[in-house]
Image (cartoon, rainbow, N blue to C red):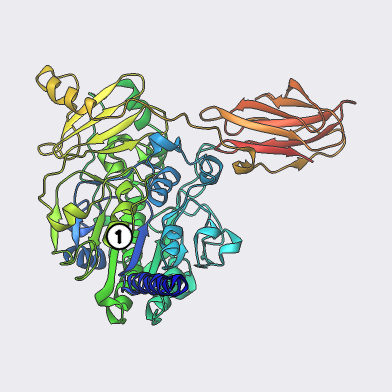
Amino acid sequence: MNHILMVFNACILIGYVCIVEASLFAADSIRRPNVLFIAMDDLNDWIGVLGGHPQSLTPNLDRLARDSVLFENAHCSAPACNPSRTAIFTGRSPHRTGVYSNLQGMRDVLPDATLIPKVFSRHSYHSAGSGKLLHYFIDAPSWDEYFPAASTENPFPRTLQPKSRPVSLPRGGPWQYVETDWGPLDATDAEAGGDFLVAKWVSEQLRKPHTEKPFFLACGIYRPHEPWFVPKKYFQPFPLNSIQLPPGYRVDDLTDVPPTGQRHARNRYFEHILKHKQWRNAIQGYLASIHYADAMLGTVLDTLHASPHASNTIVVLWSDHGWHLGEKEHWQKYTAWRACTRVPLMIRVPNGVPGLPKGTTPARCQQPVNLLSLAPTLLELCGLPAERVHDGPSLVPLLENPKADWSHVSITYLHERGSYGLSAKRYRLIHYANGDEELYDIESDPYEWKNLGNDPRYDSQRNRLRQLAPTNFAVAPKPTIDALQKLAWHPLKPGKLAPVSRPDGNRFDVVFINRSERTVSLWWMNRAGEPKPYGKIEVGKQLRQKTRPGAVWMIRDDNGKNLGYYRVGDRTAKAIIP
């Protein structure tokens, strides 16, 4: 009898296991929505639906926005590519990770972080990507498929460049980013390559049936990142004599900005561009590059619409940060003003997704949101479990009702630890680590022309916003040696000296690494061409030296022989002595 009972119980257990396994299989086989994750680089609000510039031509961005929830008060986590994209793909805030600048390597600081494509892969998605999604690397283990090949860790396909550079803007000195240049290319889209090849590859993926797995497909469109070289047909709608200056520019805009803000504003580029009478030319190049990027987006959207995935694909489009074109006398990014922190963000969700069964209804949302929320939002929409490390709130409540109550603010972290821009629904607070502050009423002053930070009538508003900001900020680890750019070694012929230094720009570190088989000495070449000693470097040792762009450092052996030299570029680097 006992034997019969044991057999009976075993049969019940086996049956129960089979039922559980069948249930799990059924859950896994539920048709999850696909995700099309589209990034544009350095795109501010100069798109038609956001009204950033009256001459922008962005029909494809505009049509996607009209079909989506358009977040009109969306901001980046950091006003630079690396920390912004790190926050997006890890779901972790800069003030918790310490990734604040472009000089840091994401994997140096966060070696074990799981990126959003890997999270989707672990939940039986096929994660594929193309183009620039992280900061100049791919992170091959995070993807199932990539173009160009993930093993190269180079996210850029072939891209046409002018044969001779610079084309439009002479280099003002070693401080100037070499890609600050623009002009039309006498080429077709296919000949230009670059984003055309990215859009082509992404479109090919969309045409595939994807019957076995849903997809997470990321499309990194590089323009309007510098340099602004795109086929000339994209320049033609913007005749130079018709170019309008940025609506947010004001001559006396910095008079009420505190000293720290003024130092952030005046970074030499704008003055240099004005000196060479290239302001309107540059605006033309930026508008043309946006128009080109929009056309590449159109290729992808058209393909999706014609594909079998049109009714089951979530579409998300974002830019990593904005861009100044003279506003606040500033060029480029790296600031906490709205011209730089505000980004296009639009999300379209079809019917029937687990986290939002009714999908989205086209609308505009005024609540302050941050790109940090993209990872948790996508997981919730797709019915996938939340990741405990994600710092941002899901946007699903706003996708369901764009006017829903929203207790969150959006914070953009500058590269100086403790400095940030905080965006609420109406007001913005900019706080610098030294205590300097700015306050703006965006409702009445969208271009942030009037700083209310010193007006006592707004003390309560400023204090309320200050209390919503974090008080603890992770320390930013110094970039590892492996992450640093390598300076070129220039050997010297016997009896020759290195050229003179022409230092020009801010100070930073260069790490000299002695890989030779002898002790060497480091010498700085002054402006008169005279070598000045700065210490010895033993075999296998390093020396970290403060320097400036354009400085020349010479290496000598113990016998006084001049071996070679390095010319410092525009950023922290390593100099390997061969």
Q: Position of residue 544 (x, y in %)?
A: 66, 27
Q: Quadrant of the N terminus?
A: bottom left
**Number of on-image labels:** 1
- Identify the amino acid type marked 1: Leu
Outermost residue toward the top? 456
Residue 140 to residue 366: above or below: below
Q: Provide residue 76's location: percent of width, then percent of height.
A: 32, 45
Helix or strand or loop: what does disc 1 sit on?
A: strand
With 47 as the anchor, is 441 left or right in this view?
Answer: left
Query: Residue at coordinates 53% horizontally, 56% vertically from top-left?
Result: 139
Q: Nearer the viewer, residue 127 or 28?
A: 28
User: Left of 342 or right of it: where is 489?
Assistant: right
Q: Is residue 400 visible?
A: yes
The spot of residue 452 in percent (x, y) is 16, 25
Residue with the mark numbered 1: 317
Screen quadrant of the C terminus? top right
Q: Can the viewer see residue 452 in this picture? A: no
Q: Quadrant of residue 565?
A: top right
Residue 262, placed above or below residue 21: above
Question: Residue at coordinates 22% horizontally, 65% vertically from top-left?
Answer: 349
Choose between 252 and 14: the one closer to the eye. Answer: 14
Residue lying farthest to the right in this orientation: 559
From the top left corner, tell me how far across and down residue 105 is, in percent: 54, 43
Quarter occupied by residue 440: top left
Q: Nearer the viewer, residue 113 or 168?
A: 113
Query: In this rendering, is residue 366 above or below 295?
Result: above
Q: Residues within 10 Å of mark 1 (few under 14, many from 20)?
A: many
Q: Image point 44% across, 75% down: which residue?
A: 4
